[in-house]
Image (tube, rainbow, N blue to C red):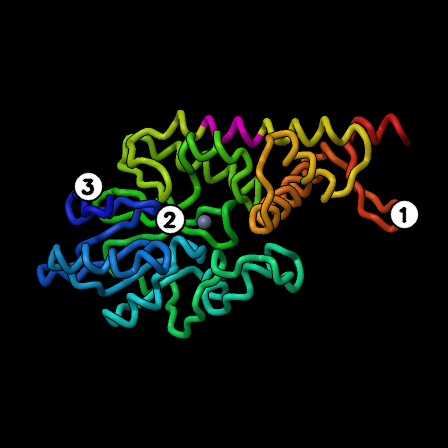
C-alpha cells in the first residue's frame, strides 16, 4: 500500500484506501495529484512523491469528500500546489458545514461526528478551466453533487466514486448516492470505457469493470424493489430508512444513519420520478406509497 505504480506514459497512481492519480507534467518532474486521501494520509502521500523526486504542482479533487480532499490543506501548505475542483465541489470545500447540513437537511445535531465529515475551509481553489494540459475532466453525477472524473493524455481514466468494489457494495448494500438516475448514467458511461485503463478510487485498477458495474446496478434495482414492496402501505421516509436498516441488518450509528437517510430520500425521489411511488400528506406527514397500492386505494 502507498506505492507509486506506473500505468501508462506519464500516468501513475498511488494505491491506498483512496487510490490517488499522479500525472507527470514535464522533465522537471512537476506533477498533478488526483485526489489526496484523508487528513491523516497527507504526510504519507507527500513522502511517496518526495521519494520519487516528484514536485507537486496541482491537486485535483474529484469531489469534496474527506477521503478525497482531507489532506488538501496540508499539501497546499507543504508544497504550494494549486487546488482545482468543479464549481459545486468548490463550494463544499470552502465551507465544512455545508456537506453535513446538506446530508442532514438542516443544521446538524451535535451527535454527528464532524471528524468524519470535516474538511478544512479553504480559500484558494481554482476552476476546472485551470486544469493543466494533458488532463481533461468529465462529469460523473450520482455519488456527489458535482463529482468529476479525469482522463489523462495517456487515455487513463480516474473515475472517483462512480464505481466502488463489489466487496464494498456486498457489505454495505446502501452506498451514498445523491442522484440515483445520475449514478446509473455514470455506471453506463464507465462501462463504455472498457479497454482503457480505469482507476476507481475504491476498487482495483482494471480495463473492464463490467462485472463490478453489473453488481452495483443490480444492487440499486434490488433496493428499489425492497422499497416498493415495503410501500404496499404508506410510510414516511424515516420509516423506509428504518426498514432498510432492518432488511439488510445494518449496524446503526449517527453517521451511518445520516448517510443512509439522505440516500433513501434520493431513492424515493427517483422512484417518484419513475412513477413507481406516489407521495402525499397525511396527518401533516409526507408519506410515500407504491403506485400500485396508491391506485388500489384511490
Ligand atoms: Zn465520496
Left or right: where 290 falls relative to 93:
right
How far from the left and from the top, in percent, is residue 43? 26, 61
Specify whether 148 is left or right of 268: left
Q: Which residue is mark 3?
A: 7
**Residue under the point 73% across and 29% down:** 230
From the image, which quarter does the N terminus lie in? top left
Q: Closer to the N terminus: mark 3 or mark 2? A: 3
Mark 1 or 2: in front is 1
The percent coordinates of residue 257 (x first, y second) are 61, 46
Q: Quadrant of the C terminus?
A: top right
Task: Decide if residue 289 is on the left or right side of residue 73.
Answer: right
Of 152 and 218, nearer the camera is 218
Which labelled disc corresponds to residue 283?
Answer: 1
- Is the residue under label 2 in contact with that under label 1 (CB below 8 Å)? no
Separation (CA) of disc 3 from disc 2 = 17 Å
Helix, strand or loop under label 3? strand
Of marks 3 and 1, the one in the foreground: 1
Q: Is residue 65 above or below residue 12?
A: below
> How dense is the environment of label 3, judged by Cα within 10 Å: few (below 14), some, or many (20 and up)?
some
- In magenta, the rendered stretch is 214-220
Q: Secondary structure at mark 2?
A: strand
Tell whether position 217 is magenta. Answer: yes
Q: Which residue is identified by label 2?
A: 149
Between 105 and 267, the one nearer to me in the picture: 105
Place of residue 152 in the rendered image (x, y in percent of width and height, measured from the top left): 26, 48
Q: Residue furthest bottom?
A: 123
Q: Of callouts 1 and 2, which one flags the residue occurring earlier in the amino acid sequence?
A: 2
Label 2 beta carbon within 8 A of ligand 1? no
- Depth check: give the residue in front, 155 or 104: 104
Element on which disc 1 rests: loop
Left or right: residue 101 compared with residue 286: left
Q: Looking at the image, is 274 positioned above or below residue 158? A: above
Amino acid at each position: 500500500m502507498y506505492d507509486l505504480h506506473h500505468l501508462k506514459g506519464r500516468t501513475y497512481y498511488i494505491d491506498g484506501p483512496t487510490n490517488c492519480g499522479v500525472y507527470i507534467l514535464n522533465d522537471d518532474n512537476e506533477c498533478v495529484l488526483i485526489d489526496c486521501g484523508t487528513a491523516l494520509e497527507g504526510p504519507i502521500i507527500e513522502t511517496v512523491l518526495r521519494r520519487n523526486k516528484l514536485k507537486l504542482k496541482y491537486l485535483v479533487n474529484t469531489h469534496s469528500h474527506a477521503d478525497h480532499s482531507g489532506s488538501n490543506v496540508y499539501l497546499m501548505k507543504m508544497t504550494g500546489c494549486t487546488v482545482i475542483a468543479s464549481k459545486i465541489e468548490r463550494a463544499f470545500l470552502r465551507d465544512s458545514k455545508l456537506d453535513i447540513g446538506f446530508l442532514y437537511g438542516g443544521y446538524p445535531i451535535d451527535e454527528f461526528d464532524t471528524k468524519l465529515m470535516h474538511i478544512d475551509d479553504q480559500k484558494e481553489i481554482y476552476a476546472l478551466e485551470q486544469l493543466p494540459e494533458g488532463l481533461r475532466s468529465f462529469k460523473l453525477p450520482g455519488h456527489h453533487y458535482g463529482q468529476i472524473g479525469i482522463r489523462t493524455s495517456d487515455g487513463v481514466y480516474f473515475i472517483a466514486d462512480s464505481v466502488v468494489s463489489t466487496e464494498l457494495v456486498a457489505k454495505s448494500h446502501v452506498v451514498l448516492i445523491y442522484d440515483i438516475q445520475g449514478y446509473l448514467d455514470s455506471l453506463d458511461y464507465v462501462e463504455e470505457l472498457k479497454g482503457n485503463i480505469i482507476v476507481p478510487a475504491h476498487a482495483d485498477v482494471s480495463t473492464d469493470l463490467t462485472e463490478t458495474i453489473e453488481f452495483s446496478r443490480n444492487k440499486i434495482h434490488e433496493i428499489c424493489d425492497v422499497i416498493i414492496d415495503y410501500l404496499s402501505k404508506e410510510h414516511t421516509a424515516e420509516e423506509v430508512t428504518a426498514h432498510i436498516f432492518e432488511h439488510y441488518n445494518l449496524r446503526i450509528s449517527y453517521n451511518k444513519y445520516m448517510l443512509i437517510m439522505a440516500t433513501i430520500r434520493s431513492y424515493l425521489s427517483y422512484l417518484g420520478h419513475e412513477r413507481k411511488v406516489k407521495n402525499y400528506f397525511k396527518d401533516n406527514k409526507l408519506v410515500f406509497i407504491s403506485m400500485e397500492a396508491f391506485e388500489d386505494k384511490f
